[in-house]
Image (cartoon, rainbow, N blue to C red):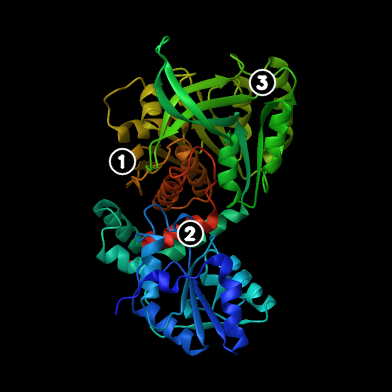
Amino acid sequence: MSVDATDKELDFDRAPEVLERHRKRGERIVLCHGVFDLLHPGHLAHLQEAKALGDVLVVSITPAEHVNRGPGRPIFSDDLRLFSLAGLACVDYVVRAPGATALEVIDQTRPDLYCKGREYADPANDVTQNIDAEAEQVRAHGGDIAYTGQIVFSSSRLINNHTDALSPQVKHYSKELSQRHPFEEVRAAVEAMQRLKVLVLGDIIIDDFIHCNVQGLTSKGRIVSSRFTQREQHLGGSLAIARHIASFAGSVTVMGMVGNEPEIRDLLNGLGRIQTDLQYADDYTTIVKRRYVERLGKRNEYNKLFAISHMHEDGPPPSQHSALLERLARTIDSYDLVVVADYGHGLMAPALMDLVQERAPFLALNCQTNSGNYGFNLITKYRRADTFCLDETEIRLAFANRHQAPSDLLRRLQAHLGANQGWLTLGSVGSLATDALGAEESAPALTLQVTDTIGAGDAFFALASMSARLELPLAIGSFLGNMAGAMAANVLGNALPVEKAQLLKFATTLLKF
């Protein structure tokens, strides 16, 4: 007999009312929570054992938008996962959780027992660090936690080995990488970043997105007419890089220059763990890049229709450069890693460049090409960096070379800067890395599902820079950078930073074979 998910699906808001009727009959409520992307014998054993510990089994799922296993996961929709679970005789109710954790479901259901797989009995195995908070929440409602499951399988391992969720290229790469550098080594590398004290120096940029729908051409002027829908602003430029680093490093400080516009101060109030050493100047206008974007139907990608940049043509005034130079000179020696994000808008004047090259204990360099500086902001204007990251257009412009192999250009730049490690990002192709010993590491792009590529390179640079500072193997730095880039490419602009727990969850997904 088939079972429709709607027969057992419990509306989140009505859960307390429905479950209270069971409590009045003296029945014990048991809750299980997870992604349940691919039901397997381990899940069945877990759920059957959980049901045996009580009378009513409620199973909640993490909704797709909160599944932190990388682009393309879950492979099954919320409705299909609820349908599969509802088809099990041992399951009494299924619930779609509203967020990324079980905390809100625990509050609604107030279970007598919250059951997790026995692999979670050691909290150190939980890369999301959610299990302790969930157990505390259950006990606050008078319940307890239990660990079940005599048969243990991994959904990710089954999906990676027996489905086409990963492309053949990524599957081959991930399997080979897992043999050279297993997840435990990757996790240890990420945890080691906690020791770093990082300074991010570069242009402060506000990304302003105007969402609209194109209506057509005007009847007289023959210009594109669009209907406004909403506006959102993100912290971009060096602030975006600092936000990516903040979840990993022990501390991160961002240094740069902004104007005294009241709305800018309001935006900068939400930096959380990031410390700021910003110079506010009345005679300077904060850089704002406004983009008009349209999303086509249900597709994830955004079309950029038009862009306007608000900025000083020649960058900060000389007096402001001098003041910033003095601020940097007082503190630069105290950092383990100095990350320079040179967007070519005038902040990195020659004296500032000289200071970071002479005194940075470890210098990570990114020198970007954009419409405002095309062909002028070349990374070769620097003479020293310990690590660097740039894209193919930027390196070809740097050497005025259209045709030479990217790997040859990468080695030339590594020699020019005297870098220990360096990365070339190649968009949908992936990345290429080299080190001072001549080793090379090629890695594929870990997703071709893209919402917006703005910010993907910054995310890659953030993780690769910390990896280089810790002298991690090129393969690990490339893997971390590509994961960060893939995650950043699936949000609009710099709306969300890459978080450590999400990146480690993505890593477990890719390295399980």
In the picture, the disc for residue 504 is: 2
Local secondary structure at mark 2: helix
Front residue of this view, candidates 413 and 488: 488
Q: Residues within 10 Å of mark 1 (few under 14, many from 20)?
A: some
Residue at 46 percent of width and 30 percent of height? 293
Mark 2: which amino acid?
Leu
Quadrant for the C terminus in the image: bottom left
Q: Residue 43, can we see it?
A: yes
Q: Does residue 331 lie above or below 159 as drawn?
A: above
Q: Badge 1 is on which residue?
A: 429
> Residue pushed farthest top?
220
Q: Position of residue 48 (x, y in %)?
A: 42, 85
Distance, label 1 to label 3, CA atoms, is: 37 Å
How crowded is the residue under tag 3: few (<14 C-alpha within 10 Å), some, or many (20+)? some
What kind of element bears circle 3?
A: loop
* Kind of residue at badge 1: Val
Q: Amino acid at mark 3?
A: Thr
Q: Which residue is located at x 45 percent, y 40 percent?
A: 456
Q: Earlier in the sequence, mark 1 or mark 3?
A: 3
